Image (cartoon, rainbow, N blue to C red):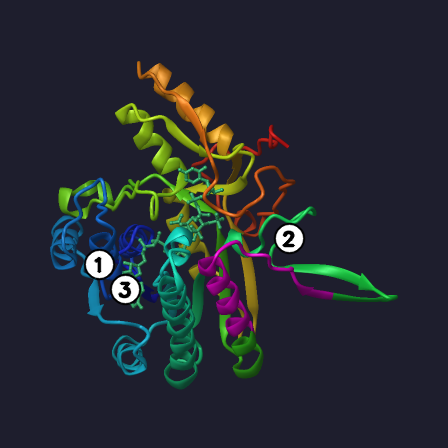
């Protein structure tokens, strides 16, 4: 397949591009290096020293004998997006290219507006480019489990059967996102579903849980292929942060009671989920939603697991409960379905574990 990876210089996009290239697909990467710029803005840095994209691509060609084309530019610029579609003619577009940190989107008005404009306009441009230049192209879009929030009922994969006043319908699952970032994903989902309906676009919305880890088989092949690993309080996700805290002797920063429960997956599963979605495309006009995670943990359970793992390594790990800087339920019911990717053949690297929320 000819697969265009938007956001291919990022944490999930880079290992995905390499995995797809390794599997024999023709891969193109699109990125404008916003993510590297936000590090400068925040005074933060990936723990692993990532190489510039041209060096990464040269290293990949050297170790694999395969080449990945790159297109540097901003997907909120429609002319740029249109030109890439004309040049690359993708069968599939995998869209990672968004501002993805909830805390970044909550800094102030400017960051909230930036996040929503960047994410919503970028996705709209991709949808219009599919309609104008490549109507049969399958859009594989990264959404988030956080679109659903934490309702007091089981979370379905995208849709729920509802009976109301004696009538029945299958409707989009209610969305209760917890940040301007998560809201941008809800807006995207609505726009994508609408374009599937009116133009016959084929799309898969992958509601991904929190990703952990950094190494995949491909990024391990050469020092210049190393993936980014964020641990700062804005872009660092919870398990990655806890591991770094344990390693340096910093108390683990559990926000509030730690009963916040989320779906998680190993980065090696992210890349496999994406290929599965590409290989089994949605039908013309179909808007599919897959919940993309393999394990479910509360924040406190993660802290305890990291504490136990640290102990085995001879580290003295302590756990702190800090006031929660976010507005979120610290104790809640959580049971999210995630069978559709498994039905397509996903066998996970994770523990496949569903641990009940011990605080709740
Ligand atoms: P990331 O920030 O590391 O990568 C995103 C990439 O997109 C960056 O390289 C950035 O420069 C690029 N980008 C952003 N805006 C762009 C624009 N307007 N034009 C061109 N390039 C642009 O993020 P990530 O962790 O790799 O996440 C990728 C996607 O997966 C995001 O959509 C995110 O919401 C979703 N996701 C991530 C996680 C996670 O735990 N990391 C979990 C669930 C969903
Ligand atoms: N948390 C702590 N301590 C920390 C950091 C986080 O207790 O030091 C808690 C948060 O309060 C939250 C949970 O851990 O309850 C998860 O936070 P996170 O920063 O790891 O993840 P989140 O903000 O939800 O965002 C991340 C990605 C985002 C993706 C989302 C998937 O940054 O791109 O959409 O995970 S999901 O959580 O399923 O929405």
Instruction: Name the residue beneath numbered marker 3.
Output: 26
Instruction: Name the residue beneath numbered marker 2.
Output: 156
Q: Residue 136 sits in which quadrant?
A: bottom left
Query: Which disc number belongs to residue 251?
Result: none
x and y percentages locating residue 121 in the rendered image:
40, 74
Mark 2 surroundings: few (<14), some (14-19) or many (≥20) residues within 10 A: many
Q: Earlier in the sequence, mark 3 or mark 2?
A: 3
Element on which disc 2 rests: loop
User: Residue drawn 37% across and 84% down?
Assistant: 133
Q: CA distance from mark 1 to mark 2?
A: 36 Å
Label 1 C-beta lies within 8 Å of the nearest ligand 1 atom:
yes
- The mark closer to the camera, 3 or 1, is 1
- Residue reaching furthest to the right: 166
- As for residue 291 lying within the magenta part, the answer is no
- As for residue 186 lying within the magenta part, the answer is yes
Q: Residue 233 sits in which quadrant?
A: top left
Quadrant of the picture in which ligand 1 is shown:
bottom left
x and y percentages locating residue 258 in the rendered image:
52, 33
Label 2 C-beta lies within 8 Å of the nearest ligand 2 atom:
no
User: Residue drawn 48% across and 68% down?
Assistant: 188
Foreground residue, 156 or 231? 231
Note whether 45 is above or below 321 in the view shown. Answer: below
Element on which disc 3 rests: strand
- The stretch in magenta equals 170-193
Element on which disc 1 rests: helix
Note whether 60 is above or below 267 in the view shown. Answer: below
x and y percentages locating residue 285 in the rendered image:
56, 76
User: Residue drawn 14% across and 42% down?
Assistant: 223
Q: CA distance from mark 3 to mark 2?
A: 34 Å
Query: Which disc number belongs to residue 37?
Result: 1
Q: Earlier in the sequence, mark 3 or mark 1?
A: 3
Q: Earlier in the sequence, mark 1 or mark 2?
A: 1
């Amino acid at each position: 397949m000819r697969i265009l990876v938007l956001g291919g210089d990022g944490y999930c996009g880079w290992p995905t591009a390499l995995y797809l290239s390794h599997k024999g697909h023709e891969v193109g990467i699109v990125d404008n290096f916003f993510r590297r710029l936000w590090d400068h803005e925040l005074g933060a840095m990936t723990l692993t020293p990532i190489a510039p994209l041209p060096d990464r691509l040269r290293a990949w060609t050297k170790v694999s004998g395969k080449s990945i084309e790159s297109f540097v530019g901003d997907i909120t610029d429609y002319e740029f997006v249109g030109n890439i579609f004309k040049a690359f003619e993708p069968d599939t577009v995998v869209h990672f290219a968004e501002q993805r940190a909830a805390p970044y989107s909550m800094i102030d008005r400017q960051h909230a507006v930036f996040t929503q404009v960047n994410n919503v306009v970028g996705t709209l441009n991709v949808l219009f480019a599919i309609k104008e230049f490549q109507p049969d192209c399958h859009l594989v879009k990264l959404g988030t489990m956080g679109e659903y929030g934490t309702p007091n009922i089981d979370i379905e994969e995208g849709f729920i059967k509802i009976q109301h006043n004696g009538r029945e319908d299958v409707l989009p699952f209610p969305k209760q996102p917890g940040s301007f970032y998560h809201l941008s994903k809800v807006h995207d989902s609505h726009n994508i579903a609408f374009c599937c309906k009116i133009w016959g676009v084929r799309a898969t919305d992958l509601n991904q849980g929190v990703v952990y880890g950094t190494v995949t088989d491909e990024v391990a092949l050469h020092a210049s292929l190393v993936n980014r690993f964020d641990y700062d309080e804005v872009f660092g996700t919870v398990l990655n942060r806890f591991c770094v805290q344990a390693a340096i002797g910093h108390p683990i920063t559990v926000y509030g009671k730690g009963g916040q429960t989320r779906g998680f997956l190993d980065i090696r599963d992210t890349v496999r989920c994406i290929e599965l979605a590409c290989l089994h495309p949605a039908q013309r006009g179909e808007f599919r939603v897959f919940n993309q995670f393999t394990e479910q943990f509360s924040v406190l359970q993660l802290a305890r697991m990291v504490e136990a793992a640290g102990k085995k390594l001879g580290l003295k790990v302590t756990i702190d409960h800090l006031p929660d800087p976010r507005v979120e339920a610290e104790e809640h019911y959580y049971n999210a379905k995630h069978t559709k990717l498994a039905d397509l053949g996903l066998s996970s690297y994770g523990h496949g574990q569903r641990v009940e929320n011990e605080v709740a």
